[in-house]
Image (cartoon, rainbow, N blue to C red):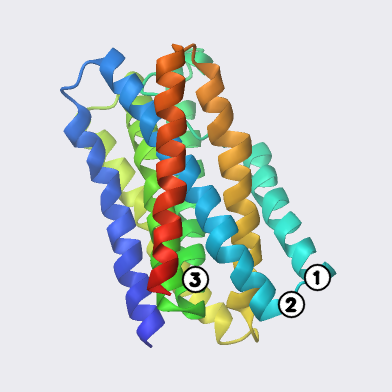
């Protein structure tokens, strides 16, 4: 019962991150772009740190260092790859990235972004719940990793909505309702866990694989996509290491 309560609280907290975009409305776009890249860098460190420092060790401890566990990690990578391909799900981390694929199809872009984000948020809820079912500390670290990734993503989706004609109120509302899908993920995981033995344990290596995919295949290329000064690249590296350091410090919580 306790993991369920903690999961719901964490999912609600993650959902409220969608409102963070409101605070960036009055920041000039060039400045916001730079800030977003630093958020992305921090998220890379957080995701990789959680995957390699917390989730993978827990996976090998609970399921064993065997071929099956390794396959589950690969499954996690492939699941996120397939979702990205099937839904043409693009994690946008730039405030005006919608211009990359604007062809006058504003409604379809908004719908695609909304559907992709909703599915992603539901998966986040499942990931968070599975982590809390392993232990409270693992749940906390995974929730933090999800939050770090959500910040640049929500800013990006907000940018898509605004650039495609939605009002600020509608953009914030759409982001919030999409984010609340994480609660559905919590309920779904609890339900499946009661019918499938050790269901949550199998989700842990899958989550690790998904986090590795998001950081290496999605977020790191986002940093390379922008031309930056050497000093900015150094700051990005600093924030990546800061994210890893945060996850390392949380080992002492376990």
Q: Is residue 106 above or below residue 89?
A: above
Give the residue drawn at x 32%, y 32%: 158
Instruction: Describe the element under mark 1 as helix, strand or loop.
Output: helix
Please name the residue that numbered disc 3 is placed on. Answer: 131
Mark 1 / mark 3, whichever is N-terminal: 1
Give the residue drawn at x 19%, y 35%: 22
Instruction: Describe the element under mark 3 as helix, strand or loop.
Output: helix
Please name the residue that numbered disc 1 is placed on. Answer: 68
Instruction: Please indicate whether residue 235 sits to the left or right of residue 214 in the image.
Output: left
- The quarter of the rendered structure image containing the C terminus is bottom left
Q: Is residue 86 visible?
A: yes
Crowd rating for badge 2 (residues with CA inside 10 Å; few <14, some 14–19, many 20+): few
Instruction: Describe the element under mark 2 as helix, strand or loop.
Output: loop
x, y percent for residue 19: 23, 44
**Residue closest to the eye, 123 or 168:** 123
Please name the residue that numbered disc 2 is placed on. Answer: 64
Front: mark 3 or 2: 2
Asked where in the image residue 72 lies, by quadrant, the reply is: bottom right
User: Mark 2 touching mark 1, by CB under 8 A?
Assistant: yes
């Amino acid at each position: 019962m306790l993991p369920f309560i903690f999961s719901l609280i964490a999912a609600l907290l993650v959902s409220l991150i969608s409102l963070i975009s409101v605070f960036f409305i009055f920041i000039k776009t060039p400045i916001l772009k730079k800030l977003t890249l630093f958020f992305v860098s921090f998220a890379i460190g957080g995701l990789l740190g959680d995957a390699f420092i917390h989730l993978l060790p827990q996976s090998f401890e609970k399921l064993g260092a065997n071929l099956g566990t390794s396959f589950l990690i690969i499954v996690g990578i492939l699941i996120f790859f397939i979702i990205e391909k099937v839904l043409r799900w693009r994690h946008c981390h730039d405030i005006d990235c919608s211009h990359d694929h604007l062809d006058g199809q504003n409604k379809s872009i908004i719908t695609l972004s909304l559907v992709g984000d909703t599915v992603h948020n539901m998966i986040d809820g499942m990931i968070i719940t599975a982590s809390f079912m392993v232990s409270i500390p693992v749940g906390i670290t995974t929730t933090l990793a999800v939050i770090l990734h959500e910040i640049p993503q929500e800013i990006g989706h907000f940018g898509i909505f605004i650039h495609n004609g939605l009002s600020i109120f509608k953009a914030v509302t759409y982001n919030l309702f999409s984010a609340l899908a994480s609660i559905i993920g919590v309920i779904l995981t609890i339900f499946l866990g009661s019918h499938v033995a050790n269901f949550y344990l199998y989700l842990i290596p899958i989550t690790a694989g998904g986090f590795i995919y998001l950081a290496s295949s999605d977020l790191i290329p986002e940093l390379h996509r922008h031309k930056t000064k050497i000093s900015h690249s150094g700051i990005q590296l600093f924030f990546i290491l800061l994210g890893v350091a945060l996850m390392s410090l949380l080992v002492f919580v376990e």
